[in-house]
Amino acid sequence: MSNSSDPGSDDLRIYPVILDGTFFVVKSVDNNGKTVLAKCNLCTVKTVISGSLAATGNFVLHLKRKHEDSIADYENRKKTQQPLIKKKKKELKEQTTNMSTSQSTLISVGFTKEVVKKQTKISNSDQLVLNFIVKGMHPLSTIEQPEFQQLVKGLNPAVNLVSRRKLGRQIADQFNIARSKLITKLQQIKYCCITTDAWTCKGMSRGFLGVTVHWIESDLTRYSGVLACRRFKGTHSYDRIGELLSEILNSYTIQLKQITRAVTDNGSNFVKAFAQYSTIEPEDTDYSAEEDISSEQENYEDLEFEDVGEILDNNEATSS
């Protein structure tokens, strides 16, 4: 079942002013409003911006950067429409209060059964092959190589080797399970640190953006998770870095107020991206809330930079 939906006539969501169709048209909504893709109505060339229903800063920032003459119209609409939106939300909340508990129970039970079914469906031999392919980062075509098949059959002639297509489905299922567990864990932690970097493969043909997350539990045990190794097409400019990074964090329900540090290199594109997109979300993540966006000036006074090399050198000196 997909977590993505295309808004239609039966869409019951109440969108904030910036996404009501005047300036942006919502194309898809993922993860219960955590990730929203919306097309700008004012751009002559098709432009899709990513954000969320609770944090609409990316959309407002695009309006300020590309359509500054529309800001006054947006502010006026926000003043007039905001009370109506709050009233609609209150009415909708009253209508769904009695149904929410039973629906949540049914969804929870259904999801648990689905996960258990997928976890018990795979055989031990298939799981061993899957672990070999994934952890060794081997291509799926490995299982079609005669030498690999001879190896498996030589170790256990009774094994029916999984097909390439089935193995692909099993990997996708286990990825979704692992991702759901990580999202649940990230929703429970108060603070975390992220690392991110962008690079281009040899020959300058393919670009990627990698993001990891790290946190410490109450027993001081340190944990890490990989959020993305996402294909990054086009120029690695600060605005595209910020938009892609925001999309990745939103997909894992990570809020800016949870992030205490972000580790990356000191490239000007990353420095400016963090300066522009580091606005802290309000405590009340009401869908009708609108974020205040900082000015376009390159003012990095609010960012704190630390020399990681110096920290590591001090730690080594202390330990020795």
Image (tube, rainbow, N blue to C red):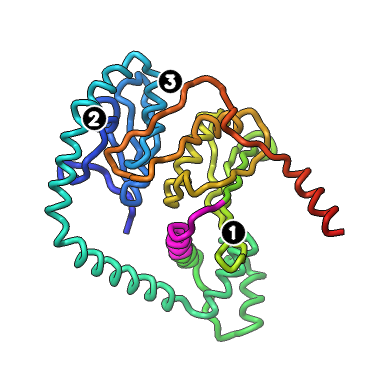
Q: Is residue 8 magenta?
A: no
Please tell me whether residue 156 is drawn above or below residue 126 in the rendered image: below
Neighbours of disc 3 within 10 Å: few (<14), some (14-19), many (20+):
few
List the residue tagged with mark 3: 65
Q: In the visual, does 279 lie left or right of 86?
A: right
The one nearer the camera, 286 or 225, is: 286
The residue sitting at 19% across, 30% down in the picture is 81
Q: Would you say the magenta stretch is mainly helix, strand or loop?
A: helix
Question: Callout 2: helix, strand or loop?
Answer: loop
List the residue tagged with mark 2: 21
Q: Is residue 186 magenta?
A: yes
The one nearer the camera, 204 or 23, is: 23
Mark 3–mark 1 Cα distance, whole angstroms, equals 36 Å
The percent position of residue 131, horizontal first and vertical second, equals 58, 69
Question: Callout 3: helix, strand or loop?
Answer: helix
Q: In the visual, does 225 lie left or right of 116?
A: right
Task: Check whether the beta carbons of the residues at disc 3 and disc 1 lie within 8 A of each other.
Answer: no
List the residue tagged with mark 1: 224
Observer-side mark, 2 or 1, equals 1
Give amino acid for label 2.
Answer: Gly
Q: Quadrant of residue 183?
A: bottom left
Task: Check whether the beta carbons of the residues at disc 2 and disc 3 lie within 8 A of each other.
Answer: no
The residue sitting at 55% across, 65% down in the picture is 218
Give amino acid for label 1.
Answer: Ser
The residue sitting at 49% across, 21% down in the picture is 296
Task: Please state the extent of the stretch shown in magenta in the rendering.
Answer: 175-192
Quadrant the C terminus occupies: bottom right
